[in-house]
Amino acid sequence: MPAILSGRLWRALLLASCMLVAACGDKAANWTLYDIKGHLPDLKFQLAGAGGKTVSSNDLKGKTVLLFFGYASCPDVCPTTMAQLTAVLQQLGDAADNVRIVFVSVDPHRDTPDVLQAYVDAFNKSAIGVTGSEKQIADLARRYRVAYQIEKPRPGDAADVYDVTHSRGVYIFDNEGQARLLASDTDSIDAIVKDLRQLIEITG
């Protein structure tokens, strides 16, 4: 079973959401990505990071944040997205110094903070991997309207063999922690780079 929601369903959900907030964005900006300003709450979390450290949204003040939900053993969407975001940061050049990828695992049973950090490090050394209890992850996912589901192991399978389904999309927050843009899996690297440059210029 594919470990993602269907692309058609996810795009339909994105379109419906964005139609509700068509008038909420920066009128002077020429966004290619979905404009979610005023539609989703500010960046706020406190989760477990590698090395026994706690990572919170306060640690990211002054940074533009690319927030992504997934899991380390995801076979397709997660590695593709991480590779795409890494390419985005490479194209941003010096502007990437104040941009951070934050990967939130929805699979805390298998993804310990250290395992998760090792996973994101393989793509980008400045990326941050975080996870937490089932309740913490569920609360954060609900805050940003992220859908996911962990399937119970099938009879005869090992306890750590199960499927995870999750919605896809990258939530982009400005350097003040405000939700600004949403990138879907159909958006190109160039489109994300263009909008990030514009966002960084607007927010200083």
Image (cartoon, rainbow, N blue to C red):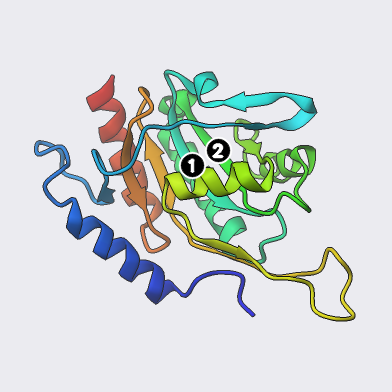
Give me the residue at 19% from left, 56% from top. Answer: 20
> In the rendered image, which residue does mark 2 sit on?
102
Q: Looking at the picture, tell me which residue is in the foreground, 202 or 72.
A: 72
Q: Which residue is mark 1?
A: 67
When the figure is inspected, residue 72 is found, relative to residue 10, above or below; the finding is above
Callout 2 crowding tier (Cα within 10 Å): few <14, some 14–19, many ≥20 = many
Amino acid type at circle 1 is Leu
At label 2, the amino acid type is: Val
Q: Is residue 7 left or right of residue 35?
A: right
Q: Position of residue 186 (x, y in %)?
A: 38, 64
Q: Residues within 10 Å of mark 1 (few under 14, many from 20)?
A: some
* Residue at position x 83%, y 63% in the image: 160
Q: Is residue 12 above or below residue 46?
A: below
- Would you say the residues marked 1 and 2 are in contact, meaning their CB atoms lie under 8 Å apart? yes
Secondary-structure class at tag 2:
strand
Residue 26, picture quadrant: top left
In the image, what residue occupies the spot 72% across and 49% down? 108
Which residue shows up at 35% across the image and 22% down it? 176
Q: Mark 1 and mark 2: span between their CA atoms?
A: 5 Å
Q: How many marks?
A: 2
